[in-house]
Amino acid sequence: MKAFLFDLNGTMIHDMDYHTRAWQQLLNEDLGGQFTREQVKLQMYGKNQEVLVRMFGPDRFTEEEMVSLALEKEKRYQEAYRPHLRLLPGLPEFLARAHQRGIPMAIGSAAIPFNIDFVLDTLNIRHYFAAIVSADDVTISKPHPETFLKAATQLGVVPTDCLVFEDVPKGAEAAINAGMRAVILTTTHEPAEFAHLPNILHFAPDYTDAFMQELV
């Protein structure tokens, strides 16, 4: 592969439980919902505003209200997760080796810049990434391929030469829709949940996995 494209949450850091808790608190305690943890987890993909629409319908909030609620959710997530913020095992070394080999890398995430900056700057890893595509940079969220296609374009690499690192089926689906193969981090989903996707090269719990080592 000539380039690596990384999703962020659940792929580079193991933080999805903290997102789920922040969403459940906001949706239930603040907004009067009665959603179970599983119901919330199933809807946690795409932009935050899209999550709110899926949970409450298109007429509950104004766009301004959704922007405010989305930011509030991320503030709660960051406050809870900050003491635990770290890259998945083996990823610091993986990024360093890929960088040394001159492999271009990008972030392709449905997170807003507020969250991406939180991770990259707190962990001091921004210098590894030549391109960053956030929720604010796309019109259509994953599983639409726009996120990964924009990242490939910014790196100057054709899509078929990109390898995507993801943790959720919708992200892997976005990869196949972009003509890209994917490696799945099993932090949040089981391999069986990806059975319908033929572009998966490997499943790994983290970056210490032998397959990951062979990539760099």
Image: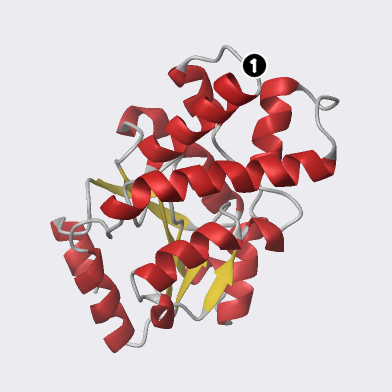
Residue at 50% across, 67% down: 117
Identify residue for label 1.
32
Q: Is residue 57 left or right of residue 11?
A: right
Which amino acid type corresponds to the residue marked 1 in the rendered image? Gly
Q: Quadrant of residue 37?
A: top left
Instruction: Examine the rendering and report whether any part of residue 65 can be seen.
Output: yes
Q: Where is residue 53 in the image (x, y as percent from the top left)?
A: 73, 30
**193, above or below 97, in the image:** above
**19, above or below 54, in the image:** below
**172, above or below 58, in the image:** below
Q: In this view, does 213 lie to the left or right of 54?
A: left
Q: How crowded is mark 1: few (under 14 residues within 10 Å), some or many (20 or more)?
A: few
Q: Where is residue 140 in the image (x, y as percent from the top left)?
A: 73, 49
Quadrant of image for the N terminus? bottom left
Residue furthest top as drawn: 34
For this rendering, which residue is in front, 154 or 40? Answer: 40
Residue at 39% across, 80% down: 128
Q: Where is residue 54 in the image (x, y as percent from the top left)?
A: 69, 26
Residue at 61% across, 25% down: 30
Callout 1 secondary element: loop
Residue at 53% across, 52% down: 175
For this rendering, which residue is in front, 167 or 84? Answer: 84
**89, above or below 15, in the image:** below
Q: Position of residue 171 (x, y in %)?
A: 51, 46
Q: Quadrant of residue 70?
A: top right
Quadrant of image for the C terminus? bottom left
Q: In which quarter of the image is residue 192?
A: top left
